[in-house]
Image (cartoon, rainbow, N blue to C red):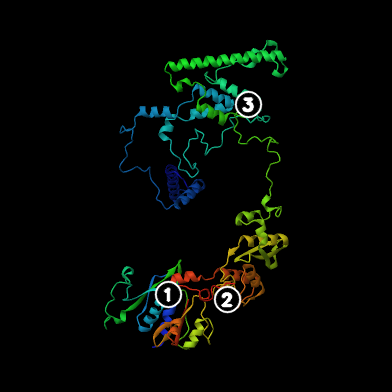
């Protein structure tokens, strides 16, 4: 499957934080989950919970055991993401797709290294203050600096600030 | 027919109904009557037809007779709910007739004709009717409050005529002697006591021929004798009063009873109400305070001047006084702030009298240490516009975030109208590679390394505004790190010993 659904996730997250939502849901698939976990590692979202069509109870968001996924309920599963705000402003402000379904952009490890130091590489602009870049690699979805640390390159997904 | 009252309406409709019926009867009678009577009948029917016609416009059915309720009401008097004596008693109490004394005082104020009108008015209305039929007004022209205008209400009503006299125009503050006399007068009027009993004065010990002349004209020996006699009199009085007090104390009187002099209340009243002017303590309702004497001894030459001595003559015109008060800066500090005109243009307002041309000016002010302000002003006078804009720029100074006191944090973008300004931080030694207005702004703010692009409209005023907006909207990495829950370390400071300059 391509990254079309992932691009939908970017725009949905951006819309949700601009609307000051506390909890929002995205379709449950591996790509979305991996990126959501990468965002969580970067401190850009508060929580990732697997749930059904109705939002989970915010009080037991982190402790509740998720329902067992079966063939019967797998189609209704969604990922519920807790969004973060600091000083009444969203922590995650802008999610911009780099690769599009019509044009995939990849970056090697040395390129990622340059980008994370603020230099432009090809069409990818260097990261500035507060920006992060997410890359889909063989080791999963990683932040650009993580990828450099683990010496992998991959498909550049999005630029988040 | 728009009768406000149902009774009047009924009356009119009744009249119309009878007229209409009469007219209809005549009309019906017309064909049967002989042709000789035609002229007379037509003359009588015409108004009746008109009335009938008019009456037909009303959709409500006309009433044949006075409407009577199906279940007749019983009057309160018939049920014994109203007692005549009580009504009379209330009437007498509430609406009494003028007494002879009141009439006399009214006569003093009003002319005979007016008095006649008052008396006629009094006679015209029965007090009993006022009790039984007096109603609160509900018409649209009623007063917004309930009042029979019998009493004067100071909040609502016009002020009564001046009761007190006008202040004495020739009054002046009392001198020491006048004040002493006034105090003695006041004390004499109080009940006799230790202090306030009517004492003899120096004049009482002088031969009669000198009594009416002032003290300064008395011969020396007369003065000396009088003083001697007065002193012995005073000593005697003091001794006598002391003995009296002693005797009273022995008699078991308490302190409060002993003190028959002025009470605390008297003294307070003296302090607050007694006039200090030579106007004989005349009370007036003037709110104007008496003017101070033109020269108050001991204060002459010590009046404050308009300008502040701290300014050391730098701001004699007082231009910077308001700014000084607002910002807390001294005039010398204000002068040290760098202010520069960035934009100036002629603008004109087309009125029916012609074009009114003004100068619109934009100033930037900065202390070179991270403070920057923007001021805009317009005036027909160039100097006024510039001065206003400069003062506003100084007043609007705000702190700008600076990284290592040389560049900005990250890259920022701001949009004003069609102008977008993008500013970006740059490494040390990069310099200010920006357009000339932003260069001046950066220099005033104390930025040394900066790059800027203005990709769209380059309107001078808007580009300055957008640059200012961008400088103020710099991100704070510390806040960002707190939001993401990350630890923030500035690598430059860690590895290169915090080289800032």
Give the image location of residue B76, x and y in percent. 33, 35
Q: Chain of mark 2?
A: B
**Do pointers 2 and 3 mark residues of a single chain?**
yes
Q: Is residue B147 visible?
A: yes
Closer to the camera, B473 or B155? B473
Q: Chain of mark 1?
A: A
B351 to the left or right of B106 = right
| Kind of element beneath mark 1 | loop
Residue B265 in the image: above or below residue B477: above
- Tell me, yes or no, whether dots 2 and 1 are on the same chain: no
Name the chain letter of the residue that bears numbered label 3: B
* Cα gap from disc 2 to disc 1, whole angstroms: 24 Å
State whether discs 3 and 1 lie on one chain: no
Q: Residue at x 55, y 74 (%)?
A: B412
Kindly state the secondary structure of the residue where label 3 is placed.
helix
Check the image and report above or below for B69 versus B231.
below
Q: Position of residue B391 (x, y in %)?
A: 65, 60
Task: Name the residue carrying label 2.
Answer: B424
Per the image, the residue denoted by label 1 is: A44
**Residue B239 image position (x, y, % from top left):** 54, 15
Report if residue B461 is visible in the image: no
Q: What whole-number distance in Å separates the C-alpha atoms at marks 3 and 1?
A: 84 Å
Question: How many neighbours does mark 3 have within 10 angstroms: few (below 14), some (14-19), or many (20 or more)?
Answer: some
Q: Residue at (28%, 74%) from the top-left corner? A: A65
Tell me, yes or no, whether the two marked residues, 3 and 1, touch with CB atoms within 8 Å. no
Which quadrant of the view contains residue B499? bottom right
User: Real-space Cα distance between discs 2 and 3?
Assistant: 80 Å
How busy is the neighbourhood of tag 2: few (under 14 within 10 Å), some, or many (20 plus)? some
Residue B484 versus residue A15: which sits nearer the camera?
A: B484
Residue under label 3: B179
Q: Sequence order check: which comes first, mark 2 or mark 3?
A: 3
Q: Quadrant of the C terminus of chain B?
A: bottom right
């Amino acid at each position: 499957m391509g990254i079309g659904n992932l691009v939908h996730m970017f725009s949905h997250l951006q819309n949700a934080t601009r609307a000051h939502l506390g909890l929002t849901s995205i379709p449950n698939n591996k790509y979305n989950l991996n990126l959501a976990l990468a965002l969580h590692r970067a401190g850009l979202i508060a929580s990732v919970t697997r749930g059904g069509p109705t939002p989970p109870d915010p009080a037991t968001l982190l402790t509740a055991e998720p329902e067992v996924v079966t063939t019967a309920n797998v189609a209704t599963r969604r990922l519920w993401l807790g969004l973060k705000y600091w000083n009444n402003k969203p922590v995650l402000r802008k999610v911009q797709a780099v690769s599009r379904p019509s044009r995939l952009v990849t970056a090697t490890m040395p390129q990622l290294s340059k980008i994370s130091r603020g230099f432009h590489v090809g069409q990818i602009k260097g990261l500035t203050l507060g920006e992060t870049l997410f890359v889909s690699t063989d080791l999963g979805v990683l932040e650009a600096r993580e990828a450099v640390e683990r010496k992998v390159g991959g498909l550049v997904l999005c630029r988040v600030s | 027919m728009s009768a406000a009252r149902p009774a009047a309406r009924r009356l009119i409709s009744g009249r119309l109904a009878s007229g209409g019926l009469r007219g209809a009867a005549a009309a019906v009678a017309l064909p049967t009557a002989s042709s000789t009577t035609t002229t007379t009948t037509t003359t009588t029917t015409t108004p009746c037809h008109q009335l009938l016609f008019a009456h037909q416009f009303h959709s409500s059915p006309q009433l044949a007779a006075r409407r009577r309720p199906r279940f007749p009401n019983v009057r309160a008097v018939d049920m014994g709910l109203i007692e005549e004596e009580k009504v009379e008693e209330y009437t007498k109490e509430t609406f009494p007739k003028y007494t002879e004394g009141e009439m006399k005082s009214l006569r003093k104020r009003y002319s005979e004709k007016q008095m006649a009108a008052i008396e006629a008015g009094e006679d015209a209305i029965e007090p009993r009717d006022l009790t039984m039929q007096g109603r609160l007004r509900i018409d649209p022209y009623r007063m917004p409050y309930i009042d029979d205008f019998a009493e004067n209400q100071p909040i609502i009503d016009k002020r009564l005529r001046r009761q007190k006299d006008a202040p004495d125009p020739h009054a002046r503050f009392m001198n020491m002697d006048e004040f002493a006399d006034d105090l003695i007068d006041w004390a004499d009027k109080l009940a006799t006591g230790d202090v306030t009993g009517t004492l003899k004065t120096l004049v009482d010990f002088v031969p009669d021929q000198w009594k009416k002349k002032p003290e300064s004209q008395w011969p020396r020996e007369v003065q000396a004798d009088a003083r001697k006699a007065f002193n012995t009199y005073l000593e005697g009085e003091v001794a006598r009063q002391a003995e009296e007090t002693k005797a009273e104390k022995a008699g078991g009187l308490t302190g409060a009873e002993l003190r028959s002099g002025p009470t605390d209340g008297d003294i307070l009243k003296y302090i607050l109400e007694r006039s200090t002017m030579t106007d004989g303590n005349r009370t007036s309702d003037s709110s104007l305070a008496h003017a101070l004497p033109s020269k108050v001894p001991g204060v002459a030459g010590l009046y404050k001047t308009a300008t502040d001595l701290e300014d050391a003559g730098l701001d004699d015109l007082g231009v910077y006084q308001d700014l000084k008060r607002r910002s807390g800066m001294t005039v010398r500090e204000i002068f040290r702030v760098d202010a520069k005109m960035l934009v100036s243009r002629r603008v004109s307002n087309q009125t029916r009298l012609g074009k009114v041309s003004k100068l619109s000016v934009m100033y930037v002010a900065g202390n070179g240490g991270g403070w920057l302000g923007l001021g805009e002003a317009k005036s027909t006078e160039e100097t006024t516009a510039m001065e206003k804009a400069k003062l506003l720029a100084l007043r609007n100074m705000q702190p700008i975030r600076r990284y290592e006191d040389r560049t900005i944090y990250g890259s920022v973008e701001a949009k004003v109208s069609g102008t977008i300004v993008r500013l970006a931080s740059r490494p040390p030694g990069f310099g200010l590679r920006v357009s000339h207005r932003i260069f001046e702004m950066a220099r005033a703010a104390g930025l040394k390394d900066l790059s800027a692009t203005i990709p769209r409209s380059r309107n001078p005023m808007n580009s300055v505004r957008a640059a200012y907006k961008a400088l103020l909207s710099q991100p704070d990495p510390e806040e960002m790190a707190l939001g993401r829950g990350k630890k923030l370390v500035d690598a430059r400071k860690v590895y290169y010993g915090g080289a800032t300059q």
